[in-house]
Image (cartoon, rainbow, N blue to C red):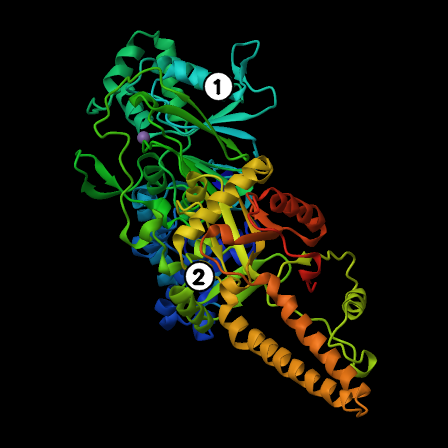
Amino acid sequence: MKTITIPKFSLVVLVGATGAGKSTFAARHFLPTEVLSSDAFRALVGDDENDQSVTAEAFQALHAVAAQRLSLGRMTVIDATNVQPEARRPLVELAREYHVLPVAIVLDVPEKICLDRTAARTDRDAGPGVVRRQCASLSRSVGQLEREGFRRVVVLRGVAEVDAAQILREPAWADRSAESGPFDIIGDVHGCHAELADLLGLLGYQPDGDGVPRHPDGRSAVFLGDLVDRGPDTPGVLRTVMAMVAGGTALCVPGNHEHKLLRALRGRDVRVSHGLAESLAQLKAEPDGFRNRVVGFLGGLISHYVLDGGRLVVAHAGLPAQMHGRASAAVRAFALYGETTGETDEFGLPVRYPWAQDYRGSAMVVYGHTPVPEPTWLNNTICLDTGCVFGGRLTALRYPERELVSVTARRVYFEPRRPLEVPAPASPAAGDEGGRLLDVADVLGRRGVETRLRGRVPIPEQNAAAALEVMSRFAVDPRWLIYLPPTMAPVPASPANERPGLLEHPADALAAYRRDAVMALVCEEKHMGSRAVVIVCRTPEAALDWFGTRRGGIVYTRTGRRFFPDAAMEDALLHRLNGALAAAGLWDELGDWAALDCEIMPWSLKADDLVRGQYAAVGAAAVASLAAASEVVAAAGARGLEMAGLGGRTRQRLAAAQAFTGAYHPYVWPVSSLDDVRLAPFQVLARVDRHLLRTASRLAHASRATTIARRRPHRRDPPPPGGYQRRRC
Ligand SMILES: [Mn+2]
């Protein structure tokens, strides 16, 4: 019995003449949906499996479906004769395009059997000439399949071998998604053995009985490659990492330097540069046995790993989403060397293609390769190469904690060709916020939003366009817009005759919530101001990590527009709020940033026109006219007329008018500086874990908001207790 091992995700091309038993073989080993048969596609496009005149159209459709399956990462089996090189070429190209391993399984069944089977079938009209030509083509093909690009070729000779074959599907080598860590991912070491020992110690690794660094909590180290070259002790680094990998306490992916070193050790012709000379000299002093073990270790490294259920990808030079978990020469080249634009910079080094800027994948990608002064998050990717060998630092990322841990290089071991502290290129479109460019392709066309309760909510193209129009004219940088308060949903009020003189009453609201089975209700006193969402970041670095700009935060209205026309006042408010959170000791709890739901007072700051044009005018007119009316009524009463009824009603109306102006007066005052502005946060909406808080936990957060409010240095006396307005729930 022959067992054929293929990766779980492959493009399997069956090769065999008509009558060789391909469809039977496919049905036995694969799901019906995995098999794309040329006969079925002839029927799909032309209503007849045997209609050879639609062959071109059928294959066009078959290739299109195969491409879609491969882009989705699905096993795909091509059930067609595939006996001619020109039939196989587009399939090999498809495999290359989608970075999937092309496998050829040849069903080499004697011509006589093919002819007999074909003749016995009433639903096939392939003549004996056709079958003979196919068998001849096949025997010419078998030897050249590998040259055509098939990475695995299996030839089953004779009916017995075809019938007895078993197929074993194995996970891709890069697929370690069952391993969920926690991990300590370590950037480019480059022979800095002392710093590696320092870092492992700092991370909590201790030598076990065999001297292998092991973490007491079962954490694993992940090495991002470029362990070797340039530094003082490449053999020491290799010894540590090889022992950890063998001992099951580390994973390692290769870097471009490992690739070159391996070629040199195997005696290939390699240009000895970039610190390779140091490694070769250091390894020369080692025993042959060690060198052989190094060759074995480096030769067995997998280009990249997909970890933790697909949530984490590690690769030396990073990896775009469409390559995650896939295997091809292109994937390996990208993972080890990255993609370059073909240009060189002013230091003569290749300019690297900024793949991370375009990255939109859901997996976190952690990589090294490009020395950076400071690791920075960009679209859920981060580079951990902090240039230790150039006198920088050796850095680790704790996963899933997202914590950076680093040790400083003991000295400069290798002078960099390009200074490490290269200022970030200024991007004109990022404005004064020092942030990254937005990509319009993220918002054009038909969009969808994945939701927990309602599945995917589609956004039609015209709605997206209208939103883009509004956003680009009025709104703040959309990366800040993590929340817009919903429009208030008033509860049904009781009929007017049930509560004479009242528009609405809290009892109606409570009754309505009870009917809706609302289990808990938070009632808060709300200040009469203007609604504002405030995002405040602990540091500019945190702002860049999470929101892609260096501003310390933002204050925006409930429609997503900037609250303060004056940027200086906004900055000053954010600065003061940051200080208040620090003074209240809340940063340790909140993490790097927090979003607060607030009222900003005075109300007149935003609503001045409304106050002047409507409230003040109504109040002034009512008070003036009713006061005058009262005087007239009083004078008439003094003349002995019966005015008690009208007098009482007029006094009541005057009191109501005065109460009306009294109600908004405490929230109206002139603003000449930030000291005249007051912030009343009533809810912590979100913090670093990026989840908007659920209602159940709002009580706790309401009290937390109170803490912030208390700690804020108030410069004015609070309004009188009667001046607060009850907030509608
Ligand atoms: Mn590298």
Q: Residue at x 35, y 67 (%)?
A: 56
Work out whether residue 437 or residue 254 is closer to the camera in this orientation and state it.
Answer: 437
Q: Residues under labels 1 and 2: Cα distance?
A: 49 Å
Are dots 1 and 2 in contact, CB under 8 Å?
Answer: no
Q: Relative to 404, does residue 286 appear above or below in the rendering?
A: above
Q: At label 2, which amino acid type do we have? A: Val
Q: Which residue is drawn at 37% across and 26% down?
A: 188
Q: Does any portion of residue 10 appear in the rendered image? A: no
Residue 494 in the figure: left or right of residue 107: right
Q: Mark 2 points at which residue?
A: 65
Question: Toward which corner of the image does residue 190 lie, by quadrant?
Answer: top left
Residue 436 in the figure: left or right of residue 593: left
- Residue 18 in the image, given as x and y percentages of width and height: 43, 58
- Marks 1 and 2, the one that precedes in the sequence: 2
Q: Relative to 601, does residue 343 appear above or below in the rendering?
A: above
Q: At label 1, which amino acid type do we have? A: Leu
- Residue 171 in the image, given as x and y percentages of width and height: 52, 39
Q: Name the residue under label 1.
A: 200
- Residue 652 in the image, given as x and y percentages of width and height: 75, 78
Q: In which quarter of the image is ligand 1?
A: top left
Element under disc 2: helix
